[in-house]
Amino acid sequence: MPFALDPHSGVPVYRQLMDQIRYQIAGGILRPGDELPSIRALSEPLGVNPMTISKAYNILVRDGLLERRPGKPLIVRKMAARELRRSQSDQLRDALQGPASMVHQFDIDIAEAQALFRDLLEED
């Protein structure tokens, strides 16, 4: 379960970690019941303060993506299909915010932008 964190990206490291875990869950890379590395085991190779990892994990537990088990590693929580689809849709919406802003900034017709997006979806 590799994570790539960039301390110079302008996005807080805890947020980068959360986003990558969310993406891996939504994409099926991390599956229900999969264990996450301990805070210490993850902070050392990433060169990140353990409190940063703890913050990301705590938010993901609060959001219902991870499950805490006393004395055991955190695991990915089982989600209903509807809940997983909502998570996937939320991530897609977030990813499309930048391109949507470009459409507005470049004053591209919405139908033209939709056609471009459709073409991209249909590429092999």
Image: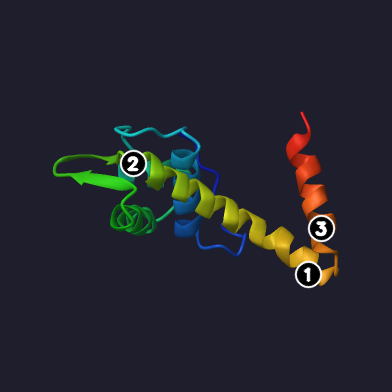
Mark 2 and mark 3 residues within 8 Å of each other at the beta carbon: no
Element assignment for label 2: loop
Q: Can residue 47 be spotted in the picture?
A: no
Dot placed on the residue nearer the N-terminal end, 1 or 3: 1
List x then y, in percent, for residue 43.
39, 47
Question: On the rendered structure, is 83 left or right of 110?
Answer: left
Nearest to the observer: residue 115 or residue 27: 115
Q: Which residue is drawn at 62% across and 54% down?
A: 95
Of discs 2 and 3, which sits in the foreground?
3
Question: On the rendered structure, is 72 left or right of 39?
Answer: left
Q: In this view, does 39 lie above or below 56?
A: above
Q: Residue at x 34, y 41 (%)?
A: 80
Q: Residue at x 46, y 44 (%)?
A: 85
Dot placed on the residue nearer the N-terminal end, 2 or 3: 2
Q: Residues within 10 Å of mark 2 (few under 14, many from 20)?
A: few
Q: What residue type is labelled 3?
A: Ala
Residue 111's disc is 3
Kindly identify which residue carries mark 1.
104
Residue 80's disc is 2
From the image, which quarter does the C terminus lie in?
A: top right
List x then y, in percent, for residue 1.
45, 34
Q: Distance between the residues labelled 2 and 3?
A: 34 Å
